[in-house]
């Protein structure tokens, strides 16, 4: 009989560890992937969503790429034709989906990678396609982010390739920090209850940002806004975070002392963020900086921030990082959205439309059915939970009953219009009064599509400074 | 050197506050109004519940305006200040070594508790909708990080609640002082950064803070100092509020590496009916082999002169840095006292040269006291005591082949008995206070210290009458 040699055993374990990342995937994700109709469509792309941790990633959601209108009409990406190639996969479309999905995820949850269900004859191409998708998605969702990945952040993103006929799945990772990297094998394992065990952490952050718009050149407007937000984000990043009123050491186990019994029903933890009043030393100048500006942006009000950590001995530093990143993301994506929205309206109104006071879209939350966490969305004043529900369906392929959508976390703009800017009279404008059209989201089929969105900001800036 | 009461603790609160405002026009009154408004906003921020004090090197956080909320729980509003020190970990200094607080000074230093100014971003007092406002108007955007720096010297038994309240008040007062300085020195839209400095005055005033505009030299701020001297009833013949007079916090090492006032670590000898007459203020100890300069055997008078110069600089009389050997030699060449070849040489100088250089480089006049033989120095008690009382400057003495610095005398008017407090420039070692005082490189010497048969010249620098 074979007697295992313990020394060899140890070595093998080491090899396994080096071999690749482990993905711990909720059963619901498997159910979802299996349920996707692969008969009509020759292939299906989609996103994998969950939490990245040092040792392994936890996958809790998968969402297929929404169909574009013309495809929907013709019934599938290849319109009934036999798929002979994956070349017509639209990288921009998939990555725009990833960007919008990222905005719907609270802190701690992110787009982990991409899946592709394909017919057997395309299996050779699949890996290359997935590689391009992963890099395109990562590039798209990191753009506009106010924080940078740290050296210790995991930079591996996952691809899951499933053969529509054999149902055989291949899991690989790519290091998005290394454009020349090759695919590394990874371990994909289904497990029940992953989506259920999440600890929430929340806070309300008071914003009071003033951003002067330099008058030297019109293209500087975008730079000014970005720089202003980045300065603020730096303070958040370096700030001190307390949890439930306590300072916790980095490696403190957040679930210690909690009752394990009530699954998924842990009370939300309250986070507090304290910032150094202002960095001294960095800019030791002997006079005030005086900038000739052509305008001034003020971002004011209270935003609700939320993050989730997987309840397998979550460390305090993970929770802190997740909530801080949520604070930064919710501000950057909302200002971006507002600019996009304003640009969309600008088409049929005058150039002076961008001015005065604009309410930022409100953040609303909804529990994912069968899971222990919420996803979020942003609702413009002229929208309702019906729109939100539709977007959840469209973007996350997730049916959320309207009555479970929580719109109470942030105050609506009407209540606070009078307490906005101190003294300075606002310039009333057309846009701030006229009702806004629907926020463009990709499923509704904007004629100009993704490319227009991508250039939205710069165009907008050009217009408003003229 | 004035020492603070050891039964008190200094709380020092620092942090930058960002002052921002938008100027619609650049005419004086409107700028003034906008700035005052911006200062008012900062003050209300200071009074808000978001204000947090973070005790450095500890996990103590204090919300002074939230009913003095403190974490961790074992510290409360009623905790005496002295207990805070138990929560503070020793700071690691730059070299990575644990800093060692010298215990040998027997508690002569006052402890300093450093506090950082923070703001809480979360838990707002009311929900208000997030909005983005854009004003399209040509403006000037002003931004300036105000370097807040407040101190409170409090008895160790005072409780934290009281101290944090005092610090909030001090912050607001300092903002008001800064506003005054900014407005006073404003030219168009050029706004000078206000800089707070602390000065230790004789009791009862103690530590007081003055705010000066950055970049404006002391020479142009005399009117401000006049007002301060008046307010605190200080003599108007010596600087007390120049930047160089600023209080040096005991927890901050001098960056230049020279020892300050080593004589304060030397015990006073006992002598009946005698009184000490000592150097006033702060000097640094200059001696052989410093500044990567091997002057062993010839530079003692240069070093003694440097010690004298350091006194003038640190009392705020001159801005000039302590001169190097070469600069001293050049000065002597410039006045025609020495030939050009003197620069770079290893030639000795004496008391008269010291007098000339002080005049040439610092504009300081000195009296020369000639003593025909060393044994006569014992009878100069009255002259020396008068000097230290009236002028308080270190004296350079040269005689035979040696130069020394006299920092004071212990003198009995009734018996004429005398001892001299000597700072010896011939020391070639490192800046080790223990060694310097143990081995007598700085210490009290009897009249036998002087060579009986040599003659001596004492260069007694005079204090200019100025503030």
Image (spheres, grey):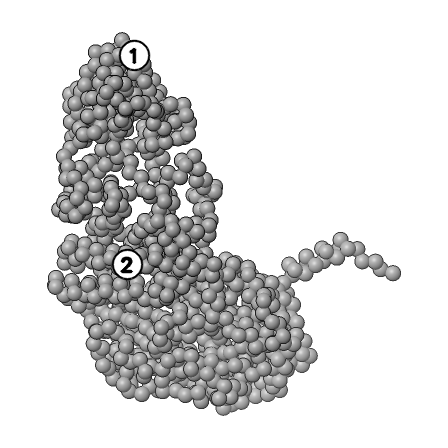
Discs 2, 1: same chain: yes
| Nearer-the-camera pick, B104 or A461 | B104
Q: Position of residue B404 (x, y in %)?
A: 29, 21
Residue B171 in the figure: left or right of residue B26 = right
Q: Is residue A402 above or below residue B200?
A: below
| Nearer-the-camera pick, B373 or B400 | B373
Secondary structure of the residue carrying numbered label 2: helix
Residue A339 in the figure: left or right of residue A318 = left
Q: In this view, does A400 lie above or below B248?
A: below
* Res B28 → quadrant: bottom left
Residue A418 in the figure: left or right of residue A196 = left
* Res B163 → quadrant: bottom left
Q: Can the viewer see residue B360 in this picture?
A: no
Q: Where is residue A70 in the image (x, y as percent from the top left)?
A: 47, 87
Q: Spatial distance from mark 2 to mark 1, Cα to Cα?
A: 60 Å
Q: How crowded is mark 1: few (under 14 residues within 10 Å), some or many (20 or more)?
A: some
Secondary structure of the residue carrying numbered label 1: loop
Q: Can the viewer see residue A273 in this picture?
A: yes
* Numbered mark located on residue B451 in the image: 1
Q: Which residue is drawn at 64% across and 59% down?
A: A18
In the rendered image, the quadrant that contains the N terminus of chain B is: top left
Q: Label 1 near label 2: C-beta < 8 Å?
A: no
Farthest residue, direction bottom: A73
In the rendered image, the quadrant that contains the C terminus of chain B is: top left
Residue hosting label 2 = B169
Q: Report the mark closest to the observer, 2 or 1.
A: 2
């Amino acid at each position: 009989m074979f007697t295992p040699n313990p020394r060899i055993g140890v070595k093998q374990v080491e090899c396994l560890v080096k071999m690749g990342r482990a993905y711990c995937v909720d059963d619901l994700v498997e159910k979802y992937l299996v349920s996707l109709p692969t008969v009509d469509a020759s292939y299906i792309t989609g996103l994998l969503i969950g939490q990245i941790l040092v040792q392994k990633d936890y996958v809790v959601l998968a969402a297929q790429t929404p169909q574009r209108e013309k495809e929907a009409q013709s019934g599938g990406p290849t319109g009934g034709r036999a798929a002979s190639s994956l070349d017509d996969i639209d990288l921009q479309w998939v990555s725009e989906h990833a960007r919008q999905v990222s905005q719907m995820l609270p802190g701690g949850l992110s787009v982990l990678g991409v899946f592709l269900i394909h017919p057997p004859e395309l299996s050779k191409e699949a890996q290359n396609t997935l590689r391009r998708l992963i890099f395109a998605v990562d590039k798209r969702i990191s753009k506009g982010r106010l924080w940078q990945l740290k050296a210790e952040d995991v930079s591996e993103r996952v691809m899951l390739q499933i053969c529509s006929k054999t149902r055989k799945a291949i899991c690989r990772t790519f290091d998005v920090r290394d454009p020349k990297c090759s695919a590394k094998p990874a371990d994909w394992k289904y497990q029940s209850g992953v989506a259920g065990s999440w600890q929430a952490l929340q806070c309300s952050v008071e914003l009071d940002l003033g951003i002067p718009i330099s008058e030297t050149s019109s293209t500087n407007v975008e730079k000014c806004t970005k720089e202003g937000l980045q300065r603020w984000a730096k303070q958040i990043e370096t700030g001190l975070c307390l949890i439930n009123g306590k300072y916790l050491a980095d490696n403190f186990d957040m679930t210690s002392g909690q009752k394990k019994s009530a699954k998924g029903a842990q009370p939300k933890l309250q986070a507090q963020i304290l910032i150094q009043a202002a960095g001294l030393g960095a800019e030791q100048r002997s006079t005030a900086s005086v900038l000739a500006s052509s305008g001034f942006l003020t971002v004011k009000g209270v935003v609700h921030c939320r993050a989730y950590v997987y309840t397998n001995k979550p460390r305090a530093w993970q929770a802190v990082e997740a909530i801080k990143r949520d604070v930064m993301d919710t501000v950057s994506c909302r200002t971006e959205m507002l600019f996009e929205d304003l640009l969309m309206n600008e088409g049929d109104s005058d150039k002076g439309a961008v001015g005065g006071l604009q309410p930022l879209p409100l953040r609303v939350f909804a529990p994912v059915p069968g899971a222990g966490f919420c996803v979020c969305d942003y609702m413009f004043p002229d929208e309702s939970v019906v729109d939100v529900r539709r977007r959840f369906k469209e973007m996350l392929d997730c049916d959320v009953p309207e009555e479970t959508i929580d719109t109470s976390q942030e105050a609506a703009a009407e209540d606070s219009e009078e307490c906005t800017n101190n003294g300075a009279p606002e310039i009333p404008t057309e846009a701030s009064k006229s009702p806004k059209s629907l926020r463009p989201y990709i499923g509704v089929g904007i004629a100009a599509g993704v490319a227009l969105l991508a250039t939205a900001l710069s165009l907008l800036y050009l217009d408003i400074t003229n | 050197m004035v020492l603070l009461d050891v039964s008190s603790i200094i709380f020092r609160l620092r942090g930058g506050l960002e002052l921002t405002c938008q100027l619609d026009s650049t005419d004086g009154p409107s700028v003034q109004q906008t700035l005052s408004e911006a200062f008012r906003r900062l003050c209300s921020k200071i009074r808000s519940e978001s204000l947090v004090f973070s005790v450095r090197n500890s996990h103590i956080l204090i919300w002074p305006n939230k009913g003095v909320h403190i974490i961790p729980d074992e510290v409360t509003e009623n905790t005496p200040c002295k207990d805070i020190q138990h929560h503070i970990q020793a700071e690691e200094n730059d070299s990575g070594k644990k800093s060692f607080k010298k215990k040998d000074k027997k508690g002569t230093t006052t402890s300093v508790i450093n506090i950082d100014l923070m703001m809480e971003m979360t838990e707002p007092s009311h929900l208000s909708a997030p909005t983005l406002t854009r004003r399209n108007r040509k403006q000037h955007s002003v931004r300036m990080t105000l370097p807040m720096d407040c101190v409170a010297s409090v008895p160790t038994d005072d409780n934290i609640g009281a101290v944090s309240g005092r610090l909030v008040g001090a912050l607001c007062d300092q903002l008001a002082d800064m506003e005054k300085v900014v407005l006073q020195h404003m030219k168009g839209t050029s706004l000078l950064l206000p800089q707070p400095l602390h000065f230790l005055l004789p009791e009862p005033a103690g530590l007081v803070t003055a705010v000066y505009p950055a970049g404006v030299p002391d020479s142009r701020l005399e009117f401000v100092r006049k007002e301060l001297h008046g307010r605190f009833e200080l003599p108007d013949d010596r600087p007390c509020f120049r930047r160089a007079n600023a209080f040096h916090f005991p927890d901050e090492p001098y960056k230049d590496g020279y020892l300050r006032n080593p004589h304060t670590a030397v015990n006073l000898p006992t002598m009946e009916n005698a009184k000490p007459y000592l150097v006033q203020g702060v000097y640094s100890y200059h001696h052989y082999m410093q500044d990567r300069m091997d002057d062993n055997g010839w530079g003692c008078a240069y070093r003694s002169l440097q010690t004298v110069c350091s006194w003038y600089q640190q009392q705020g009389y001159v801005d000039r840095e302590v001169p190097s050997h070469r600069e001293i030699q050049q000065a002597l060449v410039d006045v025609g006292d020495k030939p050009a070849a003197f620069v770079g040489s290893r030639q000795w100088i004496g008391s008269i040269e010291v007098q000339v250089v002080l005049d040439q480089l610092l504009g300081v006049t000195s009296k020369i006291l000639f003593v025909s033989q060393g044994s006569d120095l014992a009878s100069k008690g009255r002259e020396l005591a008068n000097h230290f009382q009236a002028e308080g400057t270190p004296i350079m003495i040269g005689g035979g082949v040696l130069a020394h610095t006299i920092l004071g005398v212990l003198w009995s008017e009734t018996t004429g008995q005398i001892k001299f407090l000597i700072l010896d420039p011939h020391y070639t070692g490192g800046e080790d206070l223990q060694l310097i005082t143990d081995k007598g490189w700085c210490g009290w010497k009897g009249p036998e210290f002087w060579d009986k048969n040599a003659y001596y010249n004492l260069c007694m620098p005079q204090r200019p009458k100025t503030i």
